[in-house]
Image: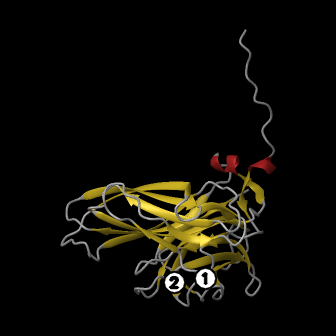
Amino acid sequence: MVPIYNPGPAAPAAAAGWARRFGTLEAFYPRNAASAFVQSVGGVWVWSAYNTIATLGSDFVPHLVHLLVRIRLVTTAIDGTHLEYEVATGIAGSEVAIGRFTDAFVGSIVLPGVNTQAYLTFGRTLPLGPRVIPSGTRLSHRVRVSNGAAFVVEMYAYLGGYDGGAAPPLDTVYALQDHLQGDHNARTVTQPSGATLSIMGAAFPNYGPWTPVLASAPQDLLIWGAARRPSVISGGNVSMYMEIGVGAAGLEQPIGRVGFPGGASSSTNLEQLYRPAKALQGERVAARLTGAAATMECTLFWEEVTP
């Protein structure tokens, strides 16, 4: 008789939490400064030089990279390329990769040239394997493409994580397994919908005023992130952080922070948290920006959930 495998009792719900509530907020490098930049150099899979992102001021555990990708097209034919983007640690000349990411694009333009002003810009948030990186370590990045004759790729980046690895505790009300099984009857929502929210920032390290997003959450929310673009499009690099908070006016408490890398004439992104931040039914939700005294048109997105 063949024995039947019995996996035993399921793990307790406390071990399955995944959202965050209060506690340590995400920190970024570069810290309170414009995002780091690197650009492809042409050719076929030719790496650019490493550009410095920052030198760590304390032990740091990264877990994501916020990217703004700006692509210039330089041929009329419909063409495509892959890219690889790499993050590394170590002194110049002795870099060691700690993360490598890939993407792919197809496009074409008319009246092309090496100085074309035709380009596409978008944001990406990608997971970066967490590890403890000691204080004083240099962080750097580089990029390469498979078709440098047709595409020039610029990458602007913030590395996100926690100083000293002080990750906030998990909220255990919404277990990930239950969520993926549909038990929380989730619905993905954007706010506002069919409109944008104007949020005024301030120069690093100060934040602009809290701007109301919701007067009262209709039910519990798992907030994932936000999109932004400048109210007035200019040639400047507008790199920013956004804090999302809950609470009455004047008493807001941040529950999450995302980074918006900025690029020349292209400071627009969709970026998200590594783990969603939970707002409770009935709570007022607000957002604020730091990085520049500029107004951004913003939308946030989240899941409405029921325990």
Disc 2 is placed on an element classified as strand
Residue 140 lies, in percent from the top left, at 54, 65
| 298, above or below 131, in the image | below
**Residue 189 can be seen in this image:** no
Q: In which quarter of the image is residue 247?
A: bottom right
Q: Mark 1 points at which residue?
A: 289
Q: Which residue is drawn at 58% across and 80% down?
A: 33
Q: Which of 30 and 10 is in front in this view?
A: 30
Q: Quadrant of residue 289?
A: bottom right
In the image, taking residue 249 as reference, residue 29 lies left or right, namely left
Q: Name the residue under label 2.
A: 296
Residue 76 lies, in percent from the top left, at 20, 65
Kind of residue sitting beneath label 1 = Leu
Please rate how many residues cluster around mark 1, counting C-alpha atoms within 10 Å: few if below 14, some from 14 to 19, many from 20.
many
Disc 1 is placed on an element classified as strand
Q: Which residue is drawn at 48% across and 65% down?
A: 50
In the image, taking residue 275 as reference, residue 169 lies left or right, namely right
Labels 2 and 1 touching (C-beta < 8 A): yes
Furthest residue toward front: 93
Please rate how many residues cluster around mark 2, counting C-alpha atoms within 10 Å: few if below 14, some from 14 to 19, many from 20.
many
- C-alpha distance separating marks 2 and 1: 9 Å
Residue 191 lies, in percent from the top left, at 56, 73
